[in-house]
Image (cartoon, rainbow, N blue to C red):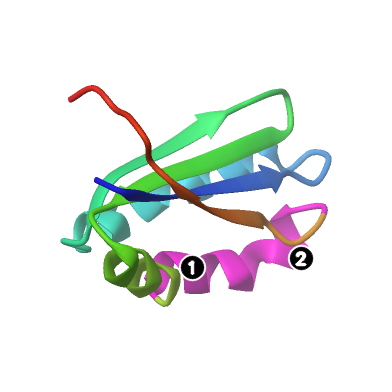
Amino acid sequence: MKKALIVVLEANSGKEAEVENFLKSALPLVNKEPKTLYWYAIKLSANTYAIVDTFADDTGRETHLKGKVAEALKNKTSELFQKAPVIEKVDVIAFKS
């Protein structure tokens, strides 16, 4: 595991439950992506969420960014989120398995 994404999402006021349901509904889609090694949807604060996912290489990360979860996220941005998600491509320097 060498590559990762951190995606920060700020929910529109009153849309927090819908954001959580959306994130839960993304899990079956991610489970079909063999190059996505780990995927977490987490709540950072009352209306701020994040997705953290890891990949063995850039190919896996880029494949994920072109996948169904990314497409669904784009389609729901104006409805659920205050602004477009902030997507950070990062390198994993250490991890515990």
**Drawn side of residue 72 relative to residue 13, left or right:** left
Q: Going from the N terminus, do you reach mark 1 or mark 2 first?
A: 1
Q: Determine the residue positioned at 61% across, 71% down.
A: 74
Q: Which mark is residue 78?
A: 2
**Drawn side of residue 28 relative to residue 87, left or right:** left
**Drawn side of residue 59 relative to residue 70, left or right:** left
Q: In the rendered image, which residue does mark 1 sit on?
A: 70
Label 2 neighbourhood size at 10 Å, few (<14), some (14-19), many (20+)?
Answer: few
Q: Quadrant of residue 66?
A: bottom left
Label 1 neighbourhood size at 10 Å, few (<14), some (14-19), many (20+)?
Answer: some
> What secondary structure is found at the residue carrying circle 1?
helix
Percent coordinates x, y for residue 22 in the rendering: 51, 50
Question: Mark 1 belongs to which amino acid?
Answer: Ala
Q: Determine the residue positioned at 30% across, 48% down.
A: 2
> What secondary structure is found at the residue carrying circle 2?
helix
- Quarter in which the N terminus is drawn: top left
- Quarter in which the C terminus is drawn: top left
Real-space CA distance between mark 1 and mark 2, rounded to the nearest whole angstrom: 14 Å
Percent coordinates x, y for residue 70 in the rendering: 48, 68
Look at the image and give the residue range highlighted in magenta.
Answer: 67-82
Extreme-front residue of the structure: 93
In front here: 76 or 3?
3
CB atoms of marks 1 and 2 within 8 Å: no
Q: Is residue 6 above or below residue 95?
A: below
Percent coordinates x, y for residue 20 in the rendering: 54, 39
Q: Is residue 67 above or below residue 47?
A: below
